[in-house]
Image (tube, rainbow, N blue to C red):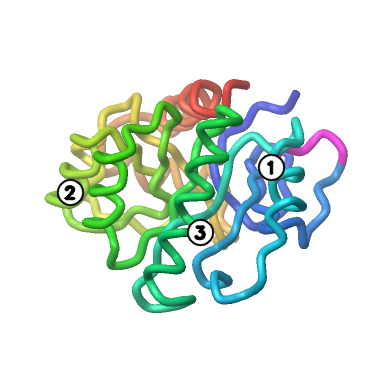
Amino acid sequence: MNIITDIHTHHPKPDAIVDIGTGNKNLPDGFLGSAGVHPWHSDQKIDWDKLSQLISSPYIVAIGECGLDALHGADMDTQIRIFEKHIELSEQLHKPLILHCVRTHAKILEMHRSIKPRQEWIFHGFRLRPTIAAALLSEGINLSIGEHFNEQSLKIIPEERLFLETDESLLTIQDIASHISKAVNLIPDYIVNISVNNIKRACKL
């Protein structure tokens, strides 16, 4: 198996968890992926039987990106119902959630506190202020950092809660680790290794 350094990308890469949505992309042999309904597509018809079968596949090691978005997609009640279904699948299949969260972190916190999930939740592309980072971390939600990030928030993330991602960026994980290293005074290879170990744990690799 390839060493996985990147928890979330939309570009097929052998060292990453590749987001294939509801199955609209094919993964090359040996690649690992995540699957789920992006909140932007929450107003479309969902074939839950097909999606559940896809998510159950051994090469799908995480669920999402899924979550809540106050600016796009269906009404919030519909988004919440869809997100709850992803949480249910996460718990049943013992796979972590990759969270998409736009202006809804308070609701995400409320749901996490109420449900008390056993599987890890990973807030992808986190770039918000330190007070929000601290609230999410205190509730047990992990943070994934990509090309753009809040330096002060980055500094309060414990190593065991930090993930790296490329998302839509054309940068490599090594590039992102180099940017991060300047803020936290750690060598890039060490930062990449943090992500590798945390992905192994969360995705049970």
Residue occupying the point 47% across, 54% down:
83
Residue 8, numbered label: none
> In this view of the protein, which residue sits in the foreground, 59 or 68?
68
Circles 2 and 1, Cβ within 8 Å, touching? The answer is: no
Q: Nearer the viewer, mark 2 or mark 1?
A: 1
Please tell me whether mark 3 sits on a helix, a strand or a loop. helix
Residue occupying the point 37% across, 59% down:
101
Residue 32 position within the rendered picture, expressed as x and y whole percent measured from the top left: 71, 37
Q: Residues within 10 Å of mark 3 (few under 14, many from 20)?
A: many
* 148 on left or right of 2: left
Mark nearer the N terminus (1 vs 3): 1
Q: Amino acid at mark 1?
A: Ile
Q: Amino acid at mark 3?
A: Ile
Disc 1: which residue: 55
131 w.r.t. 77: above or below: above
Quadrant assignment, res 113: top left
- By secondary structure, the bulk of the magenta-drawn segment is best described as loop
The span shown in magenta is: 29-33
Circles 1 and 3, Cβ within 8 Å, touching? The answer is: no
Q: Nearer the viewer, mark 3 or mark 2?
A: 3
205 w.r.t. 178: above or below: above
Q: Amino acid at mark 2?
A: Gln
Residue 82, numbered label: 3
* 148 on left or right of 164: left
Residue 20 position within the rendered picture, expressed as x and y whole percent measured from the top left: 70, 54
